[in-house]
Amino acid sequence: MASTEETHWILADVSLESTRVASASPSRRPVLAHQKTFTNNQHSTLTDILLQFEKDTGILLRNSRCGLSVPGATQGDSISLARSRWTVSRTGLASLFGRPPAIINEVAAVAWSALDPDTRVSPLGSFPSPDYHKRGCWAAVSMDAGVGLATIVVDQFGNTQVLEGEAGHAGFAPGDRTETELLQVLQRAGKHVSWERVISLDLDDPVWDQMDAQLSREHRANLIAKCIGTFVGDVVVTLGAWNGAIIYGSHAMSVKSGRGQQLFNERFEQKHLRRLMQMTPRWLLQRSDATLTGVATMMGLTFGQA
């Protein structure tokens, strides 16, 4: 009888244009090895990429455990990837590996990466580093190609869960007259105007030129910073994530310092629970390998031996 002993983990991070794949030995703190990057449009399916990885490295997929990060919601057996023609089948991957895959979305992967001891975050104000060894709830908001949410929950026994969400698709709520005009301009397209649509706006998007209020690039960036503050603050209030909010991604860089950070914090704290919001920490996570690291961290904390 063939052995079913788990000797390797195969970890993959699927993004819009490329897929990164690595191996790791099963461990509480897995170390990535054999890292390879594949261009998606050169392959028909994710399975093709995984089989190529097997051929390139000599590491058999069969009886390895697969951890996978994908863009979009991960519910159901057949997962349609956001902004992609690909579909991932849980049943298909289970057949390929011989055991069910662990699939999370890319924002949850970023949240898991925050739990890695090597990850560093920059406070957006005078706040201490997050402490995940105590009971608490943290919000993780990613702002790259899209806007997504994950929630980190640590219970009284030290058990950790990361819950996925799609808060970026919630309706945009303007905070002043200029933002109201922006909403009205975006509504002319006849589509739902989400927080993701606003926060992801490029500073050179033609939408800005349709507004009566002619805004400079600096003012456009400041408007986005304020909207990020409102959105992240709303997320914290909704989740009760009083232990803090972690933000990540290219659009989050607009609040890294200076005027952008000031406007972000003002809007974040502009709630009925103002005193509580002022006490709620905020951090910026900057790590180029956050998603793949997050997959590894998730696998280690979920399947690794203590």
Image: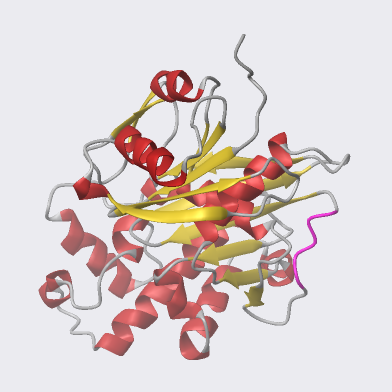
Q: Between residues 248 and 183, which one lies in front from this camera angle?
A: 248
Please identify the residue farthest to the top as the structure is shown.
Answer: 1
Would residue 289 appear left or right of 280 to someone viewing this image?
left
Q: Between residues 158 and 232, which one lies in front from this camera angle?
A: 158
Residue 139 painted magenta = no
Q: Between residues 287 and 276, which one lies in front from this camera angle?
A: 287
Residue at the location (39% across, 38% down)? 50
x and y percent of residue 81 in the render?
A: 32, 39
Q: In which quarter of the image is the C terminus?
A: top right
Q: In which quarter of the image is the N terminus?
A: top right
**Magenta region:** 129-133
Q: Between residues 266 and 256, which one lies in front from this camera angle?
A: 256
x and y percent of residue 238 in the render?
A: 59, 48
Magenta stretch secondary structure, dominant: loop
**Quick check: can you spot residue 235?**
no
Give the colour scheme of this rendering.
secondary structure
Residue at the location (56% across, 25% down)? 63
